[in-house]
Image (cartoon, rainbow, N blue to C red):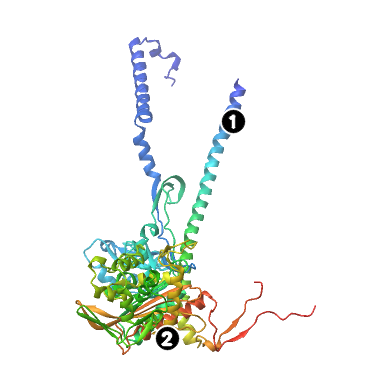
Amino acid sequence: MARLNLVLALVLLACALSVVSANHRARKLFTELEAGQKRMRDLDVEWGQLQLEQSTLAAHVRVATVAREKLGMKPPAPGQIISVDALPGK
Amino acid sequence: MSRSIKFSKSPLLSQRLPPWRQRLVLVLLLGGFLTLIGRSLYLQAFNNEFLGDKGRARFERVIDISATRGRITDRHGDVLAVSTPVRSIWAIPEDVELAPAQARSLAALLEIDVREINRKLATERDFVYVKRQLPPDVAERVTALKLPGIHQKNEYRRYYPSGEVMAHMVGFTGVEDSGQEGIELAFDSQLAGKPGSRRVIKDRRGNVVEDVESIRPPQEGREIVLAIDSKIQYLAYSHLKQALQEHRAKAGGVVVLDARSGEVLALANLPTYNPNNRSKLVGAQLRNRALTDSFEPGSTLKPFTAALALETGKVRVDTPIQTAPGKMTIGSATISDAHAHGVLTVAQVIQKSSNIGSAKLALSMKPEEMWTMFDSLGFGAPLKLGFPGEVGGRLRPAKTWRPIEQATMAYGHGISVTLIQLARAYQVFARDGDLVPLSLARLDAPPLAGKRIFSVQTAREVRTMLEMAVQPGGTAPKAQIPGYRVAGKTGTAHKLEGGAYANKYVASFVGFAPASEPRLIIAVMIDEPSNGKHYGGDVAAPVFAQVMAGSLRTLGVAPDAPQKPLVLTSAEPAREEM
């Protein structure tokens, strides 16, 4: 009887300790999850800013101005356009 | 020395105590224990709520989860409106104690004058904004200064990268991030996100260590994909702007529709404004004229009169109509043509844009017939696109029409429409006689069938007439585009001012291309051109041609007309001998 009690007491102690360690691990993982989610939000924000930057730089007003003034480009005259037939069967 | 006595020999032990003392101690001890048990029972079982709350209040926190407003993109996914987080720096002036060096470094970061900061902090108020809407990285550096009394607040700011080009379509949001104009207002409920909140456990250092429950999950705003094509929009905007400068006009608008699906590919208005900087905004800039201003369209309505006459079998395409001598008196009023013509066929009436010819066609029909046609074309009632401030124009009930009014309505006077209504009505000619509803949002599948207004034959006959109108001998040879067959109609209308026609004009042009299989419908309206020219064929038609040519090239629509100075080569690869 006394031996059984001792064994049960040891089992109880082991259980209690594993609960503690499991809880600790859960919190650690949760912190990681939180950090990951924060990173996700930050990246989302950065993505939005990059999209904004991209559409600002690629705005047609800007592209047209750069093409015309910096690169000296102009729309082709009708005579300069060569119409190409599509490949047969495609 | 040994005066002490052993405990067991103590004389006190041999004394007999009275038994009540023993019992009294026992009862007192038991009573004490019972009180403790009772108290703990009370705390643990009956009054546990209170203590539980107190405990939770020490480690549980409710935190808000912000939701961002949805983006607005064009049909290709290019961003037209996006929210990014910004920080506002605010201060409690009483708490702030800045050393001159600290004030200088803060001023340098915020890019404002030191005196400005000192002036703001010298107020009596409890709360002042030092600077609003700072980029987050600058705000971080302000945090690093660790100034007492200086705080930060997270906010969102909406940016419109396409600026004034897209201003009327997209609109803008107010300070509280709610839609004020345009799509931002029309689709506000879908764009707006709903912030959520959750309960968490925080440790001493403020880190979240456990998620207890989600009180309300956040709802991110939905992304709205518009039907707008930003390239076509830019073409429409820039050519309209050029034309307005050239003709010193007051205002103007361009609408580009997809003839197949009814999507609005571009909608440009001038004057416009920059939605990112609205400090000097006036009402005239805000007007989305294509939808909110109606005007008397003039000759652009003639094709509908002709179509109805053909449809009801009153005339055929080649029925001759006498328009000489260019004047006609109905009741007490006289109508006239800008240039006198002789006998014209119905097709030539449209090609030469004869008022008298159209009036004669109209007078051969019943007012109710014309009213029913105008009504089914969508005139006189808003299109219900969901856009704020949309108007329906004016179409009076047929019973009140006098003959002179019926005659003038045939060529677009005494009736008013918006530019987008006009563009939409031209669908009947571009789409073989039916009408589909317009859509501001991108459609995944084109609508199957529209509402039939005219027969296929009538629509095609009128289309041929409209093609003649842009050819030499018509009113708008300037609407021609090399490589494509174009169909369209000019309009030049006197403006009504205070009930009388003034010497001011509205020049317009509505047309579509390629005429063999229409893809795009473009309507152009220019208000008060005042640099000598005022005819639709001179003022509005060139804008149409430029926008149409650019748009067709952008969409990769194959040319349907032989081009004279064209060099044709075949890309068929030369075959080698096997």
State the image quarter where residue B147 is shown: bottom left
Vertical order, A10 against B526 (above or below): above
* Location of the N terminus of chain B (image quadrant): top left
What kind of element bears circle 1? helix
Chain of the residue where label 1 is placed in the rendered structure: A
**Residue B527 visible from this viewpoint:** no
**Residue at horizontal 24%, vertical 61%?**
B126
Asked if residue B490 is positioned above or below residue B365 in the image, the reply reads below
Horizontal side of residue B309 vs B334, given as left or right: right
Q: How far apart are the alpha carbons under marks 2 and 1?
A: 99 Å
User: Depth check: B309 or B560 in front?
Assistant: B309
Q: Assign a secondary structure to mark 2.
A: helix
Q: What residue type is labelled 1?
A: Leu
Q: Residue B214 shows which numbered tag? A: none
- The total of numbered circles placed on residues is 2
User: Label 2: which residue?
Assistant: B478
Mark 2 belongs to chain? B
* Residue B427 found in image quarter: bottom left
Q: Which of B461 and B550 is in front in this view?
A: B461
Residue B530 placement (x, y as % from top left): 29, 87
Q: Position of residue B294 (x, y in %)?
A: 29, 72
Instruction: Please name the residue shown 51% across and 86% down the image.
Output: A73
Q: Where is residue A49 in the image (x, y as percent from the top left)?
A: 45, 67
Same chain? Circles 2 and 1: no
Residue position marked by numbered label 1 in the rendering: A10
Classed neighbour count for the residue bearing mark 2: other residues with Cα under 10 Å, few (<14), some (14–19), many (≥20): many
Residue B352, located in which quarter of the rendered image?
bottom left
What is the x, y in percent for residue B458? 43, 71
- The residue drawn where x is 51% and y is 51% is A33
**Which quadrant does the C terminus of chain B fall into?**
bottom right
Pointer 2 with pointer 1, Cβ within 8 A:
no
